[in-house]
Image: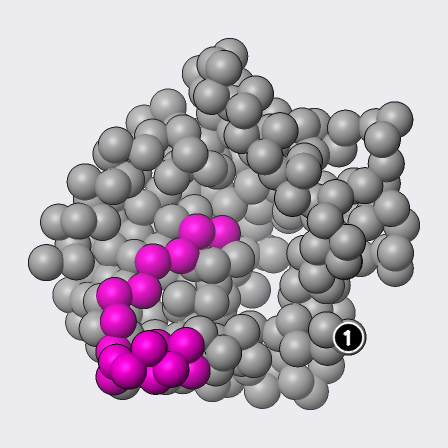
């Protein structure tokens, strides 16, 4: 779609899916942008979230405030190129280049990069990026995040996200995540009023559910009970 790539809309859509399935609440699990959607659902649609599991994503307000940290600014700098209109998605879909592999190598833990599983994951994500309009949709989320910082809609969203999260929240974070630094993600607990647990996965980068699937599955299963 041409619009609707903001976190409030994504969270409202996810809450609507819960209702469409005939449920009033759900255990919400999200990684990266899915994690940001999970944080947003828990704050803005609290009745839809029974329990929350966030993987590799800081609370939006924590991420916003992290720009004062030079290390986190450097970590996020790679995504600044996504702010350009259309050019990033053209590069993602070019046959003579492999930006998907480049990005995944940059953000993954070093141990996973050496495995055949990593090569298979790169192939899947590369194929997904080349689905018509998929790359555009992916880039639009980054563009909204960057451009909304000083716009009325972004400032409104930041104010609304001050609402304390009451859903029991498990936060899983790769200890070697070079994109969302563990020191940034760890500060998210200040926005959780309910039960909260932090779990840092050693040797794991940004793609924790791909890099350590057994550990992540066990943690989610335990928390969802």
Residue 121 falls in which quadrant of the image?
top right
Residue 102 falls in which quadrant of the image?
top right
The residue segment tinted magenta is 15-32
Residue 70 is situated, as x and y percent measured from the top left of the image, at: 62, 45
The total number of labels drawn is 1
x 49%, y 78%: residue: 13
Residue 116 is situated, as x and y percent measured from the top left of the image, at: 49, 15
Q: Is residue 41 above or below residue 127?
A: below
Q: Which secondary structure, mark 1? A: loop
Of residues 176 and 16, the one drawn nearer to the viewer in this rendering: 16
Residue 80 is situated, as x and y percent measured from the top left of the image, at: 76, 51
Q: Is residue 198 above or below residue 141?
A: above
Residue 200 falls in which quadrant of the image?
top left
Name the residue beneath numbered marker 1. Answer: 2
x 58%, y 87%: residue: 156
Asked whether 19 falls inside the magenta stretch, the response is yes
Residue 148 is situated, as x and y percent measured from the top left of the image, at: 70, 74
Of residues 215 and 172, the one drawn nearer to the viewer in this rendering: 215
């Amino acid at each position: 779609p041409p619009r609707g790539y903001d976190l409030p809309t994504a969270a409202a859509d996810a809450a609507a899916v819960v209702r469409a399935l005939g449920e009033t609440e759900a255990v919400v699990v999200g990684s990266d942008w899915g994690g940001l959607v999970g944080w947003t659902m828990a704050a803005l649609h609290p009745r839809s979230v029974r329990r929350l599991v966030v993987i590799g994503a800081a609370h939006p307000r924590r991420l916003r405030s992290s720009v004062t940290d030079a290390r986190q600014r450097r970590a996020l700098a790679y995504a600044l190129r996504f702010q350009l209109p259309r050019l990033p998605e053209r590069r993602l879909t070019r046959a003579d280049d492999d930006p998907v592999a480049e990005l995944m190598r940059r953000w993954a833990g070093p141990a996973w990069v050496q495995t055949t599983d990593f090569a298979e994951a790169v192939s899947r994500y590369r194929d997904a990026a080349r689905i018509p309009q998929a790359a555009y949709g992916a880039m639009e989320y980054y563009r909204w995040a960057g451009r909304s910082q000083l716009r009325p809609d972004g400032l409104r969203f930041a104010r609304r996200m001050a609402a304390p999260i009451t859903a029991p929240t498990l936060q899983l974070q790769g200890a070697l995540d070079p994109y969302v630094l563990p020191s940034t993600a760890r500060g998210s607990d200040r926005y959780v009023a309910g039960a909260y647990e932090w779990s840092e996965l050693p040797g794991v980068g940004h793609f924790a559910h791909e890099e350590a699937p057994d550990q992540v599955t066990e943690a989610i299963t335990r928390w969802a009970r």
